[in-house]
């Protein structure tokens, strides 16, 4: 990554950026560019002349403040660093996390952007008080883009899931998104500009065995966002769902480690055997075959944020498309359900073989060999 440059080349856009900072003129005309004068004491003013940092405030739209949740590791960390290192210095990144004692990895990755185009704030998305306290620390009180990345997983037989475990998943994955939307929508609607980005999952489109609670939370988020997006277009506020498949992160590793140690009380022996002997090996194969890096997903999110008209849905892994197509190929839903049931429980060896073949066909060395001269 190259270090941040000293100019802010932000162009007006019809998407999630601020279109209300100056009177609208010819929609085909871009506003003049202006030099950003760096004043370390106030990153917003230094990056964005229109917020009081010098320059022609009537001609240059403000740069965009992006609040990202769940930045202690994985996708959130990668998104925050990518945005903060934007060569055109278009973003002031507010990277948040529940536990500030875990900020070390982000600080190391941020490098010279820390304290310049990136600030670290505490935010627990499960707490109304924490959301309010965090937003009070936002420079100028303005958030142009929010990236809802904080998430909690839960894997295992449904019978063993306790009420508090289920509550924690929904409180983070669903109500966390809802809290921030309720807090930020008034200012976005008032300005008639804003962008709500939600890191969803392919499990919000296709349920996955033994991921019942997590899938349910992502289905809820998908429904919330799809309903909200229609209304918010009237206010020039965009909603975007980014839908990764398996991602090789610390989050996923912790979930699998906890699962391997769990006893799953209340689960019958047959179900437990299916989980340990069928699902877990298949899950490892799926991660080996389809797993993306946090950086790949982060790049997709950054592209969505920078799009002139942000898309509503962005699947990040094209290898998953054929599996998702099964869900919509049959209106009754039987085709998808029965196909996955047979592949996993009846045709296990064929399932593992097909994944191995897919890994071979999609590996970089194979692509190099078959690339046209």
Image (cartoon, rainbow, N blue to C red):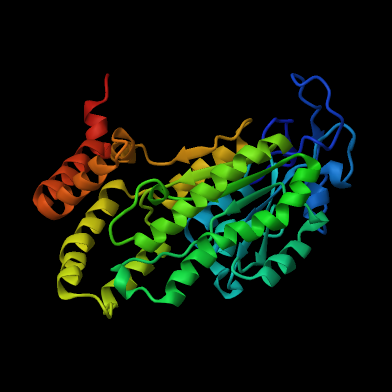
Give the vertical position of 148 relative to 263 (above or below): above
Q: Is residue 177 left or right of residue 188?
A: left
The answer to which image quadrant residue 94 occupies is bottom right
Quarter of the picture containing the C terminus is top left
Q: Is residue 116 visible?
A: no
Residue occupying the point 30% across, 72% down: 159
Residue 65's x, y, as percent?
72, 49
Nearest the eye: 330 or 61 = 330
Pick out the residue farthest to the front: 332
Residue 115 appears anywhere in the view: yes
- Across and down, in percent, residue 251 comes to 42, 64
Q: Quadrant of the N terminus?
A: top right
Q: Is residue 313 left or right of residue 360?
A: right
User: Who's the residue at 22% across and 54% down the image?
Assistant: 285
Would residue 300 be found to the left or right of residue 144 on screen? Answer: left
Quarter-of-image position of residue 64: top right
- How many labels, in total? 0
Residue 32 location, x and y as percent? 81, 27
| Residue at image location 36% in from the left, 37% down from the top | 318
Q: Which one is in front, 152 or 111?
A: 152
Check the image and report above or below for 362 versus 337.
above
165 or 279, which is in the foreground? Answer: 165
Looking at the image, residue 188 lies above or below residue 345: above
Residue at x 73% of width, y 38% of height: 235
Who is closer to the viewer here, 365 or 228? 228
């Amino acid at each position: 990554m190259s270090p941040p440059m000293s100019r802010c080349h932000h162009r007006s856009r019809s998407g999630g950026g601020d279109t209300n900072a100056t009177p609208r003129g010819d929609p085909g005309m871009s506003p003049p560019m202006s030099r950003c004068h760096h004043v370390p004491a106030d990153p917003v003013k230094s990056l964005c002349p229109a917020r009081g940092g010098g320059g022609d405030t009537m001609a240059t739209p403000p740069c965009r403040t992006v609040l990202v949740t769940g930045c202690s590791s994985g996708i959130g960390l990668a998104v925050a660093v990518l945005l903060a290192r934007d060569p055109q210095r278009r973003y002031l990144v507010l990277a948040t996390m529940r536990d500030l004692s875990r900020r070390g990895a982000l600080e190391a990755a941020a490098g010279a952007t820390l304290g310049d185009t990136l600030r670290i704030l505490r935010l627990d998305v499960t707490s109304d008080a924490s959301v309010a306290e965090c937003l009070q620390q936002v420079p100028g009180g303005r958030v142009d883009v929010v990236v809802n990345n904080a998430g909690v997983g839960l894997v295992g037989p449904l019978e063993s899931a306790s009420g508090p475990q289920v509550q924690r998943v929904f409180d983070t994955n669903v109500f966390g998104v809802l809290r921030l939307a309720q807090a930020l929508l008034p200012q976005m609607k008032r300005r008639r500009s804003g962008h709500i980005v939600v890191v969803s999952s392919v499990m919000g489109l296709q349920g996955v065995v033994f991921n019942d609670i997590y899938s349910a939370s992502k289905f809820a988020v998908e429904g919330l966002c799809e309903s909200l997006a229609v209304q918010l277009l009237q206010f020039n506020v965009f909603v975007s769902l980014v839908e990764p498949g398996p991602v090789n992160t610390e989050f996923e590793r912790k979930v699998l480690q906890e699962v391997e140690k769990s006893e799953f009380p209340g689960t019958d022996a047959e179900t437990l055997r299916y989980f340990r002997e069928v699902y877990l090996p298949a899950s490892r194969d799926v991660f080996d075959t389809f797993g993306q890096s946090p950086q790949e997903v982060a790049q997709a999110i950054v592209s969505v944020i920078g799009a002139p008209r942000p898309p509503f849905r962005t699947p990040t892994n094209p290898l998953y498309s054929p599996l998702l197509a099964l869900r919509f190929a049959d209106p009754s839903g039987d085709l998808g359900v029965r196909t996955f049931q047979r592949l996993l429980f009846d045709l296990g060896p064929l399932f593992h073989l097909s994944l191995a073949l897919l890994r071979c066909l999609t590996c970089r060395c194979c692509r190099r060999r078959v690339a046209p001269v």
